[in-house]
Amino acid sequence: MTVLVPGPLRGEAGGESRLTVAASGTLRAVLDDLAGSWPRLARRIRDERGELRRYVNVYVDGEDCRHLGGLDAPVPETAEVQVLPSVAGG
């Protein structure tokens, strides 16, 4: 399955915009697998308790994971997971 990484987080993913992750099943499993290869990126997505950071939005095939069960959201093998940090400005 594929994890899409936005520009602001690519430095934590070796400059890659698309990462291939072997895990599927739940978002938690995908992020655990991601943490094994890209721990700095994983720390930008989840806090020290393993919960999604408030300012990071994660989508599974275009659906907000928070509406699909959060970390327990189902993630099929063919899914795309997109990580988008919130943007603030003024």
Image (tube, rainbow, N blue to C red):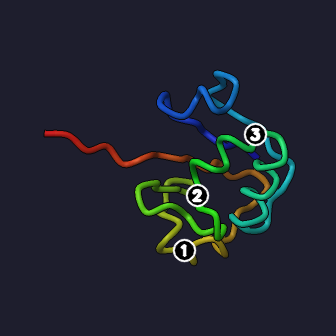
Give amino acid for label 1: Leu
Give amino acid for label 2: Val
- For the residues carrying marks 3 and 2, which lies nearer the camera in this image? 3
Name the residue furthest front: 48
Q: What residue is pinned by disc 2?
A: 60
> Relative to 73, is 55 on the left or the right?
left
Q: Position of residue 66 (x, y in %)?
A: 49, 71
Whether label 2 touches label 1, CB < 8 Å: yes
First along the sequence among labels 3 and 2: 3
**What residue is at 60 percent from the left and 26 percent from the top?**
11
Which quadrant: the C terminus? top left
**What residue is at 50 percent from the left and 54 percent from the top?**
62
Residue 36 vs residue 72, the one in the foreground: 36
**What residue is at 43 percent from the left and 46 percent from the top?**
85
Name the residue furthest top: 15
First along the sequence among labels 3 and 1: 3
Per the model, the C-alpha gap separating discs 2 and 1 is 9 Å
> Relative to 54, is 4 on the left or the right?
right
Whether label 3 touches label 1, CB < 8 Å: no
Whether label 3 touches label 2, CB < 8 Å: no
Q: What residue is pinned by disc 3?
A: 38
Q: What residue is pinned by disc 1?
A: 68
Q: Position of residue 42 (x, y in %)?
A: 67, 49
Per the model, the C-alpha gap separating discs 3 and 2 is 19 Å
In terms of secondary structure, where does tag 2 sit?
strand
First along the sequence among labels 2 and 1: 2
